[in-house]
Each structure stands twice: as C-alpha cells, then as structure tokens.
Amino acid sequence: MIILNENHQDLGENIPMFQLRGFSISEINAEGYIEIIFQKGIGISLTTKIIDLYGDTFAEKRQGYIKDTIGNLTVYIHFFGKEKDSKLIIMYIDQTEKLMNFAELYHLSKRIYNGVTPDTSKTEIRKICNTLVDIPKAKGIVGLFIIDKAGFLYFSKINKDRPYMANNNFQIAGFISAILIYSQDFIAGGEYGLKLEDINLGNGCQMFLKTKSNVIFAYIVEKPNCSENIKRYMQLLVEEFLFRYYSSYVVGFNGDLAPFHSFEKVIDQYFEI
C-alpha cells in the first residue's frame, strides 16, 4: 500500500494547478499486481490497460518517462522504483492538441514520489491531488439514479431546481426499472449489458441508461445544455461506483444505504448538478 507522509502539504506549494483530461497514481509490484491509489478523469479500466501496455518497460527500467498517443489522447507517464521492486506510476492524460509542459510535470512527479512513504493515509494523497489537478466538470445532467435491477434505489442526485423530480425519486427509480424489466438477459452477468440512449422525456430532456453487474445507472440530461465530456464521465461513474461498492455492499445488500452517501463526492468531481 502506498500512502503519503506527514509532509504531504509541501507537495502543493509553488506548483500550478493543472487542468487535464485525466490523472492517476498507481503502484505495480514485482508480481504485476496493480494498486490504483488515486485517479481522476480517467477510468480504472483504462488506467490498468495503459499500465499493462507498458508493463515490459516498467519491468526493464528502474525509472523513466513515457509519452505516447492513444486515440485522441496523449499519455504522459513518469515511473519510479520503490522498495521490493515495486514501481510508482504517475500518469497524465490530455487531448493530443494540448501540449503539457514536461518540466512542470516532472517537477510535480518527483515531489509526489519523494513524498510517498508508508506513514499516513490515502485520504491525504487524494486531498493534495485534488488541489493540484483540475478536471473540467460536465454540464447538462439534471438527475442521476443508481438502481438495482429490481428497482431499489441505491443513490440519487437531482438538480435543486427540479423539486418535483426530487420528491418522486423512488417512483422514477421504479419507472426506470420497468423500462428494463423485459431486458433481463441484457442486464444479467458481469459484462456491460443494455445501453439505451436518447430516450425522449419531453421538455428537452433525454434519459441515458447503462447497466453492469445488475446495477442500472440512469442519467436524465438537458440535451441542449450538454457539454462534450458528459458521456465519458457517465462511464467513469459506472466504474467508480462498482469499484467502491459492488463487492462490499451491492453483493448481499441488506438495505443499508449509508455506505452509498459518500458517492456524492465523486459525482461532484465530474458533474455540475
């Protein structure tokens, strides 16, 4: 486990705020096990795929720098050797047309690397990283619902200007479940199942539905006000929710909703609701 030492506040001094598409800090041990310490704006699956892609380089060199293009994104990676042949991997992602300053990124990476010791908590890593990296929020979502396949509502967040929707969130959850009740074969299993887009709700609103592992993610969107990053963030929330809660709370769910309340902080990182 990698955690930040008690001098973590020094990491943020005299370092500019970076606005990026994505940022992550991970550790890979000698056996190839990947632990994601922090990620923002980049999904867990993409982080692990990129680390797997350059696995040979990480194994061959104690430290180094990688720059590559994946689709319309440029990936910048700094990696550093740690104890017991593990590597600390710091990854930055942005659009290909936006060049990042290598010297500034390397300075930040070195300070993060030098500050990582087994003394304090990951909470402090997340805190300092959130002050260093800005991910533009998406606009246009007026309601978000996370539901099990039977219609039980795990979590919802609704724009404060939509009081009627907020007062009927459980009924809306049941309605969403009913839309999918005839598609159980899509919802079952661990892979991505049914994905419905542009369900017209009238008044300029559409509904987007995604499902995975028997969990339904429903987004009600004001289509004219959508920003371009909205669909990418929808997918990120699916991954984040399942990563945080599926094994511990969704499997064998006992009716306690308290563990899901903390997910609002994740939503607030990505969406203006």
Image: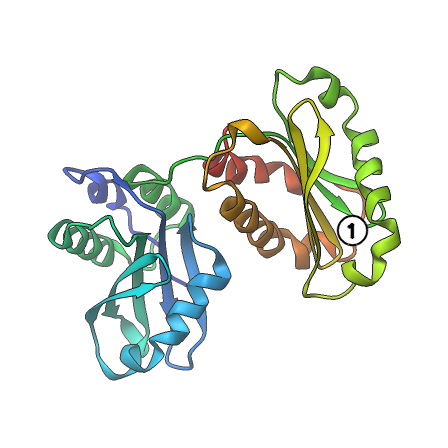
- Viewer can see residue 20: yes
Residue depicted at 61% across the width and 18% down the height: 160
Secondary element at tag 1: loop
* Front residue of 194 and 158: 194
Total numbered circles: 1
* Front residue of 131 and 100: 100
Q: Quadrant of residue 228?
A: top left
Amino acid type at mark 1: Phe
Q: Quadrant of residue 191?
A: bottom right
Label 1 crowd bin: few (<14), some (14–19), many (20+), radius 10 Å: few
Q: Quadrant of residue 53?
A: bottom left
* x then y, percent, for residue 142: 61, 27
Residue depicted at 81% across the width and 48% down the height: 254
Image height of 103 relative to 264, above or below: below
* Front residue of 121 and 77: 77
Image quadrant containing the C terminus: top right
* x then y, percent, for residue 122: 41, 51
Classify residue 233 as left or right of residue 8: right
Classify residue 81 as left or right of residue 197: left
The residue at which mark 1 appears reads as 253
Residue depicted at 75% across the width and 66% down the height: 189
* x then y, percent, for residue 140: 54, 30
Image height of 25 relative to 161, above or below: below
Image quadrant containing the N terminus: bottom left
* Front residue of 95 and 3: 95
